[in-house]
Image: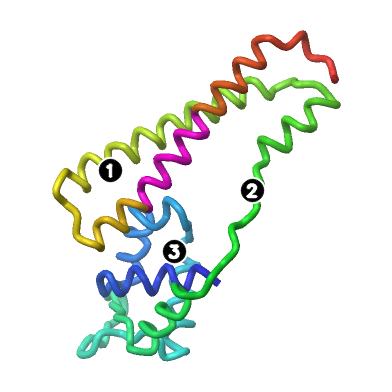
Amino acid sequence: MSLPHAILTALVEKPSSGLELTRRFDRSIGYFWSATHQQIYRELGKLEAQGLIRALPGQQPARGQKKSYEVLPAGHAELSRWTATPQDPKPLRDTMLLRLRAAAVVGTAGVEADLRRHLELHERQLAEYEEIERRDFPPGRDSPEDRLRHLVLRAGIDLETFWTRWLGHALAEFAELPGDEPA
């Protein structure tokens, strides 16, 4: 149920076309809530049919032109309702952790190389987040909106920091394991 709310959030921040939303997802919201352009366009149609958004007035796009959307009062109300509704944290489901558990009984072939690959990916993502933080959140940028956006980015930085540390520990453990035998 969160994709419609991610789209409503993005449209409240700035009325946009489906293409612009897709690009914005790739640069911001997509770091923690990804969606394909097909999913975004499908959801825009549903939100419009539900009366939560509308195409901007005065724009009747001809074939090939972009149709931009804005959030209606009912969309604001829905986003406010959803934001205020308590939700439980989601349990961690990670394939690498499951593969490590399986490696304990069937052997570790291929796992160490993939741990190294994961470490490289998380290090790259961490560097990207830190660059976004330097660029978009300089000292003194502390409006309530900026502080909340920065908080979301800090969650990404902290998660990537966790994974890089944990993967470092995992690789250190692998360095001490005997050959590729099940436990």
x, y percentage for residue 144?
24, 62
Q: Quick check: is 162 in the magenta stretch?
A: yes
Asked if the stretch drawn in magenta spans residue 120, the answer is: no
Does dot 2 land on a helix, a strand or a loop? loop
Classify residue 145 by image quadrant.
Answer: bottom left
Please tell me which residue lies in front, 75 or 81: 81
- Specify the principal SS of the magenta part: helix
Q: Which of 55 and 30 is in front in this view?
A: 30
Q: In which quarter of the image is residue 5?
A: bottom left
Alpha-carbon distance for marks 1 and 3?
23 Å
Name the front one of labels 1 and 3. Answer: 1
Which disc, if any, is residue 37? 3
Using the numbered discs, state the Cα–Cα distance from disc 3 to disc 2 in whole angstroms.
Answer: 27 Å
Left or right: residue 160 versus residue 167 is: left
Q: Earlier in the sequence, mark 3 or mark 2?
A: 3
User: Which of labels 1 and 2 is toward the front?
Assistant: 2
Q: Which residue is drawn at 65% across and 20% down?
A: 112
| Along the line of sight, the residue nearer the viewer: 47 or 153 | 153
Helix, strand or loop under label 1: helix
Q: Residue 38, how many percent across, how many down?
A: 48, 67
Q: Around disc 1, counting alpha carbons within 10 Å, would you say few (fewer than 14), some (14 to 19), or many (20 or more)? A: some
Which residue type carries mark 2?
Leu
* Numbered range of the magenta stretch: 152-164
Q: For the residue marked with disc 3, what is the amino acid?
A: His
Give left or right: position of 57 versus 31: left
Residue holding disc 1 = 132
Give the secondary structure at mark 3: helix
Tell me the residue at 20%/90% (across/down).
58
The circle drawn on residue 92 is 2
